[in-house]
Image (cartoon, helix red, strand yellow):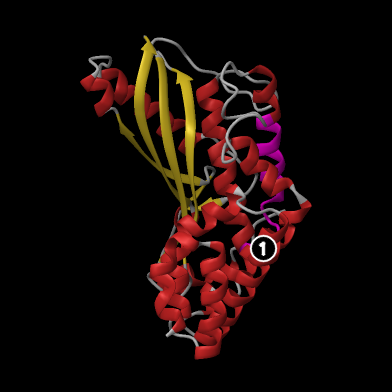
Amino acid sequence: MKKNRVLLILLVTVLGISGEVLAQELQFTVNLNYEQLIAQQKTDPQSMNQLQTYMTDFLNNTRWTNDEFAKEEKIKCKLNVNLTRSLSQGNYEANAQLVVSRPVFNSSYETVLFTYIDKNFTFTYLPSTQLYFNENSYTEELPYILAFYANVALIFDYDSFSKLGGSPYVQKAFNLVNQARNSSPSKKGWDTSGDSRNRYWLIENLMSQQFTPFREGIYQYYRQGLDVATQNPEETQARVLGFLNTIKEVAQLRPASVVINSFFDAKSDELYRIMIEAQPEERTQAYNILVSLDPTKTQLYQRLSM
């Protein structure tokens, strides 16, 4: 399914911005923190620089779709990797945070589409060894994890522009998980027996029909909600409240799911800012849903009930 970016193209045209059409879709910034390894005297800064360059180049220079992207359309992502331990030369344990964002039309505001914490980022990297990636056959752990992140970014970005537009990338990410489950030496991030927020459960959620209303609601939230906020804030508030009701229904079927938890990790401040401007009845409805689904942020949401 080709991505619908009509409004962005119109915006670029109106603003007089010209952009070269590029094959690659993602604009990743990779931040690599290896201070703990320095403290353990188990790292070489030069090899860390090479590792960061490899991750950045792999994510940004691989072609992930068949669509053409102008420079202004590239999907902005951040990958923050914290290396925690090196058991032997080239073998690393780490955790990572993926952040995916996109612009809101007719504004200077950039909204976070999705954020994900991966606690099972274990891989091998030696600067002298070339890493290979084949999406149809497991090759190496590091490129497979990075490819998974790339497809997750595509899922949420495409879903925000067209209803279920990210489905091809849900399938691709699911295939990567299945390949890795059968072949990866590190099962914790890929397997059902891992923690409930690992890569397997993230893509399981997105594959499940129980989460189809959530994915359809992403389009409602962004394309029909945030993208019209400057022209019709009341419509935005109504769409956001409708999406919160959808999430509530999904959460009743799948409580404490990684997708819903990650959504609130990314959106709590934004949800508050949108709904604080709504009418009292809508604010109260939003408050009741938010504190039931995201109780750790109750103090933030408290003013919605006043």
Name which quarter of the figure residue 297 lies in.
bottom left
Residue 29 horizontal side relative to residue 228, left or right: left
Relative side of 126 to 159, left or right: left
| Res. 232 in view | no
Q: Which residues are magenta?
A: 161-177
Q: Position of residue 269 (x, y in %)?
A: 41, 66
List x then y, in percent, for residue 289: 57, 71
The x, y position of residue 65, in whole percent, is 63, 43
Q: Residues within 10 Å of mark 1 (few under 14, many from 20)?
A: many
Magenta region includes residue 147 = no
Q: Is residue 169 above or below residue 81?
A: below
Q: Badge 1 is on which residue?
A: 162
Q: Position of residue 58 (x, y in %)?
A: 47, 31
Residue 40 sits above or below residue 274 on the image: above
Identify the image quadrant of the C terminus.
bottom left
- From the image, give the main secondary structure of the stretch colored magenta: helix
Whether residue 162 sits left or right of residue 227 in the image: it is: right
Inspect the image, locate mark 1, and give the three-letter code of the amino acid beneath it. Answer: Ser
Residue positioned 62% across, 29% down in the render: 190
- Can residue 116 be seen from the camera position used here? yes
The kind of secondary structure element at disc 1 is loop
Which residue is situated farthest in the right direction here? 209
